[in-house]
Image (cartoon, rainbow, N blue to C red):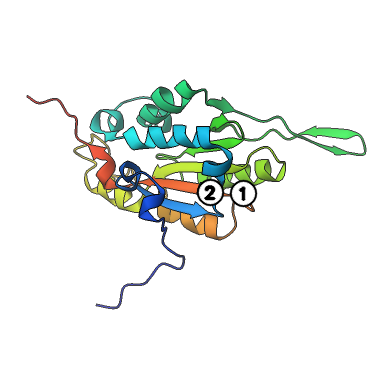
């Protein structure tokens, strides 16, 4: 067998003491352009809210198997019971370009969660080009001095493989978690390639350790 090819980009690395152990145990973390320092120093309240939500999060069997709106329904534990209760909101920014008094509306894509200059997106099982949309949105909003940092919560590629291997137990079709869906190995090259421009970004990618089997017993 040939030598296994190494990834063309650095693997995420965050010092173990820089985040709560409850987060490090369940999430792979990528800190891009010192996003963690920006969030903790400039937005300590919002950062504490994100940490509280992630620390208590578990990827439950009952959430994964829930029928509904796909991406949002399976992540409802993070969004509805966590950040939204802390005052975070879905937000679309109205922007426009003016050329010789000709005004053209250029609204941004809606951000899943927004509060006080921090934007957060959840990508659970979309097609991977959604990452381009999210990063471009972060870049634009940062350049317009609307946000100071962006956060993406998604799947690690280890969890991607685990979900694919265990799709039957989760009541999913074999191709539900395909290679072209949103998981970290699709996201990291886009970030290292400059997809977010100068915007600081932190990625929390769920690991298999986040899973909790809460199926009812017979």
**Residue reaching furthest to the right:** 100
Question: Residue 74, percent across and down?
Answer: 35, 31
Which disc, if any, is residue 207? none
Identified at 63% across, 29% down, the residue is 92
CA gap, disc 2 and disc 1: 13 Å
The residue wearing badge 1 is 199
Q: Relative to 101, does residue 84 appear above or below in the rendering?
A: above
Q: Is residue 111 left or right of residue 96?
A: left
Helix, strand or loop status at disc 1:
loop
Q: In the image, 62: left or right of 102? A: left
The answer to whether residue 151 is seen in the rendering is: yes
Q: Which quarter of the rendered picture does the C terminus lie within?
A: top left
Q: Is residue 143 above or below residue 76?
A: below
The quarter of the picture where residue 168 lies is top left
Q: Is residue 85 above or below residue 112?
A: above
Q: Nearer the viewer, mark 2 or mark 1?
A: 2
In the rendered view, does 91 fall on the left or right side of 40?
Answer: right
Visible residue check, residue 128:
no
Q: Earlier in the sequence, mark 2 or mark 1?
A: 2
Q: Residue furthest left?
A: 218
For label 2, the residue is 37
**Which quadrant holds the N terminus?**
bottom left
Examine the image and state in which quarter residue 5 appears. bottom left
Which x, y percent locates residue 183?
A: 40, 49
Q: Nearer the viewer, residue 5 or 191?
A: 191
Look at the numbered disc 2 and give the secondary structure of its residue.
Answer: helix
Q: Callout 1: 10 Å neighbours few (<14), some, many (20+)? A: many
Q: Nearer the viewer, residue 154 or 178?
A: 154
Q: Position of residue 198 (x, y in %)?
A: 64, 53
- Asked if disc 2 and disc 1 are in contact, CB closer than 8 Å, the reply is no
Residue 34, image x, y percentages: 54, 53
The one of 156 and 31 positioned closer to us in this rendering: 31
């Amino acid at each position: 067998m040939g030598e296994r090819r190494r990834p063309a980009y650095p693997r995420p690395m965050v010092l173990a003491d820089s985040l709560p152990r409850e987060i490090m145990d369940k999430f792979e973390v990528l800190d891009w352009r010192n996003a963690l320092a920006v969030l903790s120093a400039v937005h300590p309240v919002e950062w504490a809210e994100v940490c509280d939500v992630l620390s208590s999060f578990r990827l439950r069997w009952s959430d994964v198997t829930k029928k509904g709106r796909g991406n949002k329904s399976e992540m409802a534990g993070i969004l509805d019971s966590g950040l939204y209760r802390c005052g975070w909101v879905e937000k679309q920014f109205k922007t426009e370009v003016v050329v010789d008094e000709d005004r053209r509306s250029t609204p941004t894509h809606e951000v899943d969660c927004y509060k006080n200059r921090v934007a957060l997106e959840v990508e659970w099982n979309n097609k991977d080009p959604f990452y381009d949309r999210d990063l471009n949105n972060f870049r634009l909003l940062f350049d317009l001095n609307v946000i100071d940092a962006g956060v993406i919560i998604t799947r690690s590629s280890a969890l991607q493989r685990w979900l694919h291997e265990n799709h039957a137990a989760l009541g999913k079709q074999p191709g539900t978690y395909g290679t072209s869906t949103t998981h970290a190995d699709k996201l990291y090259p886009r970030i290292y390639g400059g997809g977010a421009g100068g915007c600081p970004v932190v990625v929390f990618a769920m690991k298999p350790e986040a899973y909790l089997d809460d199926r009812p017993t017979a």
